[in-house]
Amino acid sequence: MLTLTTALREKEVDYLLDFALFLEEAERSSVTIKNYLCDLNYFVKWFEQKTNQKLSPEQITPTDLRDYKHYLSEVLLLKPKTINRKLSSLKSFLNWALCEELIPEHSIPRVPQPIREEKVGPQWLNRNEQHALLRIVEQGKNQRNITIIQLLLNTGLRVSELCSLMWSDIQITNRKGCLIVRSGKSGKRREIPLNKEARQVLINLGYHQNKGKKEAIFRGQRGPITPRGVESMFRKYVAHTELDEVTPHKLRHTFCKNLIDAGVSLEKVAILAGHENLETTRCYCSPSEHDLEAAVELIGVEG
């Protein structure tokens, strides 16, 4: 059990412990559970200091929630992203309490609206985050999982497309390679060139021994791996890193962003990613927070 959960047990906050067990049964990652419990423990401390009474779900009022949001934004001056996460954790807890009949349905307090902030594009991993993910996967020495991560980063496949791949969809020669998506979104076929990294992991996984076979490349214990199986694998690895939630689709975003950063035209990125609308691809030109930080550093005056 998590250290934080143990601390909650010692405080005899049974409903938070029950919520933690619910999250574990729902197969949330340990990092996600830790974040939920940290956020809720933060609210518990604030509530008890404000009201001088122990917290129980039915005691939480809309006024409490509005005051808490004001405290986070105007007193602590937290960033909108942090405030919204804390409010989201509270909302999940209250919904759970409602399902557990700890709160009457007619009196569940409404969580305040999240703070709106300027969006800077889809979520992707920067280079350091990509290296952190690759490092933890490579340390596990599972060649199938290494290949999955590298292919998603270097081809931008949708997770359903990845799971449908057969060895006959791969063509590799000494200096180049190609991957065929036979039924992408809307049933469209496309071909994606394989760079050196993608070719090498496929060779390591057994390309030459399985070349041309109409068999699934990625298999689990019960047959071809499923999108849910891939997502479960991601959660296992990310739980051992400092990364926020990482999904297969975030790696698809990362693939597109890496191409844009390398100067590849929107038209080429759209074809490689299988985007039907160029506007879908254009969103990857929007700067990330890291891009904005790097931009202002360019005009800094050295002391």
Image (spheres, helix red, strand yellow):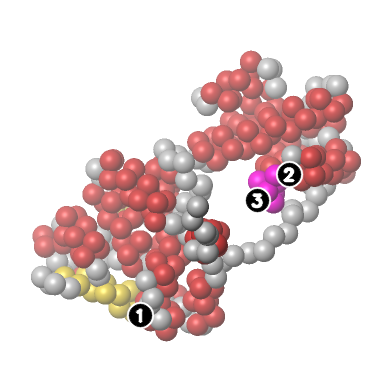
148 is within the stretch colored magenta: no
So how many labels did they put on this image?
3
**Residue 258: image location, x then y, percent:** 39, 67
Q: Which of the two marks, 3 or 2, is nearer to us in this view? A: 2
**Magenta highlight: main SS:** helix
Identity of the residue drawn at 70% across and 44% down = 78
Say few, some or many: other residues with alpha carbon within 10 Å of mark 1 (under 14 / 14 to 19 / 20 or more): few
Which amino acid type is shown beneath numbered disc 3?
Lys
Say few, some or many: other residues with alpha carbon within 10 Å of mark 2 (under 14 / 14 to 19 / 20 or more): few
**Range covered by the magenta-colored residues:** 78-84
Q: Is residue 46 above or below residue 180?
A: above
Lower sequence index among marks 2 and 1 = 2
Q: Is residue 6 above or below residue 27?
A: above
Which residue carries the number 3 mark?
81
Lower sequence index among marks 1 and 3 = 3
Label 2 sits on a secondary structure element that is: loop
Which residue carries the number 2 mark?
77
Q: Residue furthest front?
A: 303
Which residue carries the number 1 mark?
189
**Residue 179 can be seen in this image:** yes
Q: Which of the two marks, 2 or 1, is nearer to us in this view? A: 2
